[in-house]
Each structure stands twice: as structure tokens, then as C-alpha cells.
Image: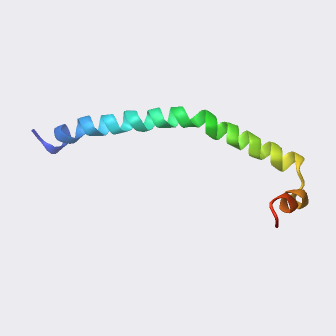
Amino acid sequence: MNLVDAIWPTLVHWLANTWGLFLEAAPWVMLGLICAGLIKAWISQERMARWLGG
């Protein structure tokens, strides 16, 4: 058994888990980006600074 045969199952498992995590998080990341875009488009920087204490 060479090194590639020993590592391959672990690599495939890691890639499958990483892809699953990406698919699970992607909708929430998109929702956050949309909310951030709407806030930036509709709320002035001065008002945001006042609300955040800046």
C-alpha cells in the first residue's frame, strides 16, 4: 500500500464534509450579503454612525 492509497479515503471524507458545510452555510451567507446591501443602499452613513455610536 502506497501513501496515496492510505491518504485517499481521508481526503475524500474531508472534501465531502467541507462541501456539505459549504452547502449548509451558503444560504445564510447570501442572506447576510443581501441584508448588508439593503442597509448600505437605504441607510446613510451618518445615520448608521449615530446608531452605532461613532
Given residues 5 and 17, the one toward you in this image is 17
Residue 21 placed where, x, y %?
A: 47, 36
Residue 42 left/right relative to 26? right
Residue 4 quadrant: top left
Q: Is residue 29 left or right of residue 13?
A: right
Which residue appears at 25% of the width and 35% of the height?
A: 9
In percent of the image, x 89 and y 46: which residue is there? 42
Residue pushed farthest bottom? 54
Q: Residue at x 37, y 37 (%)?
A: 15
| Image-based side of 19 in relation to 13, left or right | right
Report the quarter where the C terminus lies: bottom right
In which quarter of the view is residue 51 placed?
Answer: bottom right
**Residue lying at the far left of the rendered structure:** 1
Quadrant where the image shows the N terminus = top left
Number of marks in the image?
Answer: 0
Question: Where 50 sits versus 19, above or below?
Answer: below
Q: In the rendered image of this protein, does residue 40 appear above or below residue 24? A: below
Residue 3, horizontal then vertical, whole percent = 16, 44
Q: Position of residue 2 (x, y in %)?
A: 12, 42
Residue at horizontal 52%, vertical 32%?
23
